[in-house]
Image (spheres, helix red, strand yellow):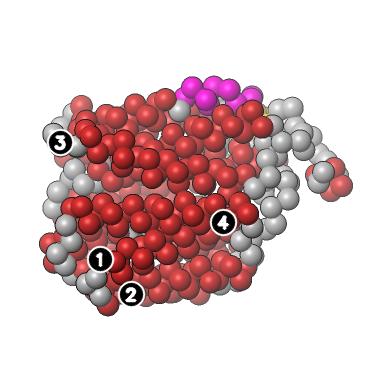
Amino acid sequence: MSARQAGAALAAAMGIGRFVYTPILPLMTAQAGLSATGAASLATANYLGYFVGALATIVRAPSRATNRWALVLLVVTLAGMPLTHSFAAWFVLRLVAGVASAVVFVAAVNAGPGWGLSGVGLGIALSGVIVLVRAEWGFAWWVAAGVSALLTAVAWRMQPKGPAPQLPPGGNEEIHTRPWSTRPNRREFAALLAAYTLEGVGYIIAGTFLVAAISGPLGTLSWVLVGASAALSPALVKLGGRYLLPAVFAVQAVGIALPALVGGTVAALIAVTLFGATFLTIAGITLKTGAGLGFPRSAAILTTGYSAGQIIGPLVATPVLHHGYHDALLLAAAIVLTALAPLSRLPAVTRTPPRRTPAELVE
């Protein structure tokens, strides 16, 4: 039940509440008079909101009531987009949606989602299908609000766990550090945070321009493909660990760079498939590894670093956009590869940490 609730929450908050803007954006540009500069500003508003929401979860872990308020806010912000043509109103709505998305994400992770992480991918796929069904910007936002409301009903009883250091959900099936200790390892956690922040920078550049480089209906279809491949990533997360995580980073870098190095539709579709399959896998393994290091509020802190990277990404990419998307994609791939350096500082891992009594699990 908890995995289904977490999956529904992540589908509503991340897959639709946060990412539906990507397939709707071309419609708003063509039908609602949204300029390219305005489009970038609305995206930045959402990134800023996500960062603020992640910071808030460090101060106070999301409760069931907080999670419910955040889910309701998401539905309201989605439904509010077609009610106005004011850019200022759109900016506020996407800012609030970003805050709410971060709160729900951390709440769902604290609930121990497991396969619930696939909800992000399923939500992304749904956001693409919404646009394919009817290409009208206002209608798309209202359908997104309706779908999010249904998912919110499923996630309504989700109960986030407290932030006290503990074994990640799943016992011996999860990945843990060696030697096992309840004392947080600050140096190794800092290395993990640095790598995940760099992933946020590279990921957002790719997420913004990889799909945008594929024009027409195929572009929307590719977004559905991103979501479908992301929905399968929890299977890789269960295999996670020190050696798989760098490999997934490397595969993601290859996928991001592929359209810039090899032209054509086939290369583009392979690229979005690799991107979809890796970005959520990286998130899942990173959050599990952070929990294994025993660092308090690890999910909230890692999510904050990731969201900070997403704010930095567009600023870094802007100077290289004068000649199309290729240079930006190559830059994103290089940044993702840079994350391999801090990852090399993580300890070896084992699948079978020593069994401990409940009293030993809390300092």
Q: Secondary structure at mark 1?
A: helix
Taking the magenta stretch, the answer to whether it contains residue 346 is: yes
> Which residue lies under the disc numbered 4?
56
Q: Position of residue 97 (x, y in %)?
A: 41, 63
State how far apart marks 4 and 3 are (Cα).
37 Å
Tell me if I can see residue 274 in this picture.
no
Could you tell me how far apart the alpha carbons at marks 2 and 3 are, in whole angstroms? 34 Å
Mark earlier in primary sequence (1, 4): 4
Q: The disc labelled 1 sits on which kind of residue?
A: Phe
Asked if the residues shown at circle 2 and circle 4 are in contact, with their CB atoms under 8 angstroms apart, the answer is no
Q: Position of residue 18 (x, y in %)?
A: 38, 58
Q: Amino acid at mark 4?
A: Ala
Which is closer to the viewer, label 2 or label 4? Answer: 4
Which of the two discs, 2 and 1, labels the residue nearer the N terminus?
2
- Using residue 295 as the reference point, say whether residue 54 is left or right of it: left
Q: What residue would you read off at disc 2? A: 80
Residue visible at 58% across and 49% down in the picture: 300
Mark 3 lies on residue: 322
Residue 233 in which image quadrant: top left
Mark 1 Cα-neighbour bin, 10 Å: few <14, some 14–19, many ≥20: some
**Secondary element at image label 3:** loop
Please report contact status of discs 2 and 3: CB closer than 8 Å, yes or no: no
Type of the residue with mark 2: Gly
Query: How far, Cα to Cα, is label 1 from label 4?
Result: 26 Å
In the rendered structure, which disc, 2 or 4, sits on the residue that comes first in sequence? 4
Q: Position of residue 91 (x, y in %)?
A: 32, 63
